[in-house]
Image: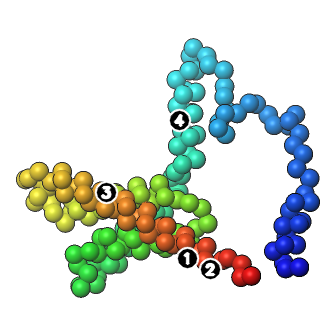
Amino acid sequence: MSERESQIERESAVDTDFDDSVAGPETEFGVETAPAESSGEQSSDAGVVRSRLGSIATTRSLGTALALSVVGVIAFSFVPILSIANGVLGIAAAGFAYGLGSDHRRYVELALAGAVTGGGTTLLGNLAVAAFASGTTLLGIALLVGAITGTVGHYFGRDLRAGLTADLD
């Protein structure tokens, strides 16, 4: 019997009874539902929105993704051959590194960080266009490409991590 089969047998032998008496207050989608009061209705709505967004993107992971994206763009800007695509490659490398190092899915964070970094790089690189002409199309393209590049880089990093950590049977 292989090691994986014995592990599956051990996991299936675990008792899965759940005691409802210790569950606490009723929850909906992992969020506690509080009775609506006239004075606290707005604060409970803000708490629900904050808790749902908190499960999608955390401040720490968003900050880490943004810092990695900025460092990636700066690092790739020193390579003279890649001067045109340094932002795209830097954001992709940052997403790849984040996916390789993290065991959680952080696609939203990498998309936001890639969009912010791509937009910021485009605005700083084309300051005259942004100031004197309509640079909204250029900015929109940069935001979209940055978001897609960060997400794709993160996907490939997670894929490599899954391949490196998979059991060989």
- Position above or below: 155 against 86: above
Say the numbered circle drawn on residue 130. none
Q: Earlier in the sequence, mark 4 or mark 3?
A: 4
User: How far apart, in angstroms, are the residues tagged by discs 4 and 3?
Assistant: 25 Å
Image quarter of residue 84: bottom left
Q: Residue at x 89, y 66 (%)?
A: 9
Dot 1 falls on a residue whose secondary structure is helix
- Crowding at mark 3 (Cα within 10 Å: few <14, some 14-19, many 20+): some
Q: Residue at x 43, y 66 (%)?
A: 152
- Position above or below: 158 against 14: below
Disc number lying in front (4 or 3): 3
Q: Earlier in the sequence, mark 3 or mark 1?
A: 3
Image quarter of residue 168: bottom right
Q: Which residue is more in the foreground, 101 or 18?
A: 18
Amino acid residing under circle 1: Leu
Q: Position of residue 102 (x, y in %)?
A: 58, 67
Amino acid residing under circle 2: Leu
Q: Are marks 2 and 1 in contact (CB under 8 Å)?
A: yes
Which residue is labeled 2 in the image?
164
Say the numbered circle drawn on residue 144. 3
User: How far apart, in angstroms, are the residues tagged by discs 1 and 4?
Assistant: 34 Å
Q: Position of residue 6 (x, y in %)?
A: 88, 72
Which residue is labeled 1 in the image?
160
